[in-house]
Image: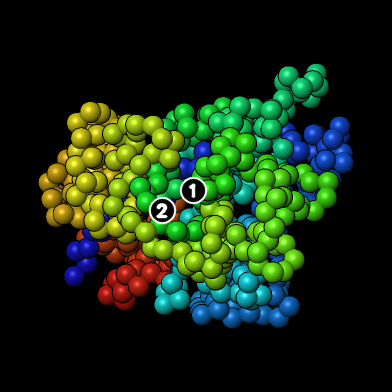
């Protein structure tokens, strides 16, 4: 009874997929408002675009009457009820083009609500990745989740998902995300001290859009988050990997990589880019047909109807990551109506067409390995090679420890865990895992200290809270153990493990 010490796996996209989009904090309350003092008309038009509406403080698209989704009930007042409690929704992510997701806070820690609005169905349903079978209220919102939706994030150092109040300084994508810092330009306005993406060379120009619209199969940070700034090369800061053969899969942000696969892009080269069809602050509604006819004017439509180039050649397809949503396929298929194929998932290559470092490739494979069994042997080999090249690379060590744990090679996993803790005493998964190792060795005071430290990073970290309760119980502090399990159920009310242990203790 009560001899459970769970580990936290180090793998997963939450650790590796750091989307390097504007981690630098805003220098003013709202930098875009400062830009609008001189660029009033442009700013007014931009505020109407989806990019400017990727986030908002408050709840958008509230139901006209209370909506029930599984065990949840969303009230018209923006309150989400669940069995035993409720949360006030405070922030909205998404422009509304496809839908909205919602966030709530508790003690400054930010979490995603399990209910989202889907425009295609004009209704509410479970948020992406949430199971209708389980009550979930503890999905942490990390900076990587906010980067492509907000401007001027204010994360609290040393935590997983705690932010200042407010969590970010500006709703949506602000001017500086595409034009770089405006501080010098505001002091002495001239073209030479602000970035105009359209005037950059193709690689630097396209990097601005690729910040948030290039998904690939895996994205791996190569530099400290926040290093990339508009005007630079994204490839110097981010390794992006794609499958050798197109899978035909779409995601919410696969526009850039899909466009690279198109015949139009291959024929046009650098001439064709995002700005060929999309203006970030348009003076009138976009005419995609006109953009197509810049190259295809001499080829009349053979569909026998009024021209609708994008309607046929850029069809919407289902997302691989989000149910109920369809996104425009920027691969521009020549033959409309041909179904998307599953494609080959056996080998990753660099999207930048360079020779990737072993470390980046190993971490790239680590992202896809949990769902693609065929690549796991190669992933392990690459991780071992990367670890031999740099025994102090914490992300590599963490992924390798996860592989060893899943292979039941506990001694090797434990050795790596000790090494990671020496290199990074605040590594969250390592705090949980090292606590488990200490507990198994009978060193309960050390284990308890490690789990308490992990909970300072995220109080809803259920594995750490449950482990802490078990250790306290075994140390004779039974009342404190019960309080920890009760606290676990406050943060994560759907935890069956915490509830079962609490029942045992009673």
Residue labelled with disc 1: 261
SS for callout 2: loop
- Residue at 51% x, 80% y is 70
Cα separation, mark 1 vs mark 2, equals 8 Å
Q: Nearer the viewer, residue 434 or 354?
A: 354
288 to 169, vertically: above or below? below
Name the quadrant of the C terminus: bottom left
Q: Is residue 86 visible?
A: no
Of the 4 image quadrants, the one containing the N terminus is bottom left
Is label 1 in contact with label 2 (beta carbons under 8 Å)?
A: yes
Query: Where is 499 relative to 468, above or below?
Result: below
For residue 494, side relative to residue 308 (left or right): left
Whole-percent x and y of residue 313?
Answer: 60, 59
Q: Residues within 10 Å of mark 2 (few under 14, many from 20)?
A: some
Residue denoted by label 2 = 246
Callout 1: SS: loop
Q: Residue at x 49, y 58 (%)?
A: 250
């Amino acid at each position: 009874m009560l001899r459970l010490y769970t580990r936290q796996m180090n793998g997963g996209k939450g650790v590796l997929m750091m989307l390097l989009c504007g981690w630098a904090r805003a220098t003013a309350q709202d930098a875009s408002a400062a830009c609008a003092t001189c660029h009033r008309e442009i700013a007014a038009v931009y505020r109407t675009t989806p990019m400017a509406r990727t986030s908002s403080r408050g709840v958008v698209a509230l139901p006209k009457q209370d909506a029930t989704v599984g065990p949840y009930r969303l009230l018209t007042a923006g309150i989400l009820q669940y069995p035993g409690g409720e949360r006030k929704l405070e922030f909205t992510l998404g422009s509304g083009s496809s839908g909205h997701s919602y966030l709530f806070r508790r003690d400054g820690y930010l979490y995603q609500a399990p209910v989202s609005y889907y425009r295609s169905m004009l209704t509410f349903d479970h948020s992406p990745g949430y199971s209708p079978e389980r009550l979930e209220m503890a999905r942490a919102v990390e900076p990587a989740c906010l980067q492509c939706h907000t401007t001027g994030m204010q994360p609290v150092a040393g935590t997983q998902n705690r932010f200042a109040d407010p969590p970010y300084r500006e709703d949506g994508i602000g001017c500086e995300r595409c034009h770089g810092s405006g501080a010098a330009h505001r002091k002495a306005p001239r073209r030479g001290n602000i970035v105009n993406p359209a005037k950059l060379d193709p690689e630097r120009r396209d990097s601005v859009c690729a910040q948030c619209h290039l998904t690939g199969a895996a994205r791996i940070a190569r530099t400290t988050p926040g290093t990339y700034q508009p005007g630079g090369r994204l490839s110097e800061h981010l390794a992006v990997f794609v499958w050798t053969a197109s899978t035909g899969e779409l995601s919410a942000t696969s526009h850039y990589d899909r466009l690279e696969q198109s015949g139009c892009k291959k024929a046009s080269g650098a001439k064709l880019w995002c700005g060929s069809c999309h203006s970030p602050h348009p003076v009138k509604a976009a005419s995609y047909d006109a953009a197509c006819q810049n190259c295809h004017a001499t080829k009349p439509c053979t569909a026998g109807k009024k021209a609708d180039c994008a309607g046929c050649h850029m069809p919407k397809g289902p997302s691989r990551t989000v149910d109920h949503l369809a996104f425009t396929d920027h691969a521009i298929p020549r033959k409309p109506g041909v179904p998307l194929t599953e494609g080959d998932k056996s080998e990753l290559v660099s999207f930048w067409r360079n020779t990737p470092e072993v470390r980046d490739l190993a971490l790239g494979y680590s992202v896809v390995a949990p769902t693609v069994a065929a690549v796991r042997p190669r992933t392990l080999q690459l991780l071992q090679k990367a670890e031999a090249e740099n025994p102090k690379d914490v992300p590599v060590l963490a992924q390798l420890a996860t592989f060893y744990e899943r292979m039941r090679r506990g001694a090797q996993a434990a050795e790596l865990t000790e090494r990671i803790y020496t290199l990074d005493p605040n590594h969250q998964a390592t705090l949980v895992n090292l606590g488990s190792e200490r507990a198994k060795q009978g060193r309960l005071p050390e284990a308890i200290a490690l789990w308490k430290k992990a909970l300072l990073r995220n109080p809803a970290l259920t594995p750490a809270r449950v482990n802490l309760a078990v250790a306290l119980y075994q140390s004779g502090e039974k009342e404190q153990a019960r309080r920890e399990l009760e606290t676990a159920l406050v943060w994560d009310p759907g935890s069956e493990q915490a509830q079962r242990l609490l029942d045992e203790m009673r």
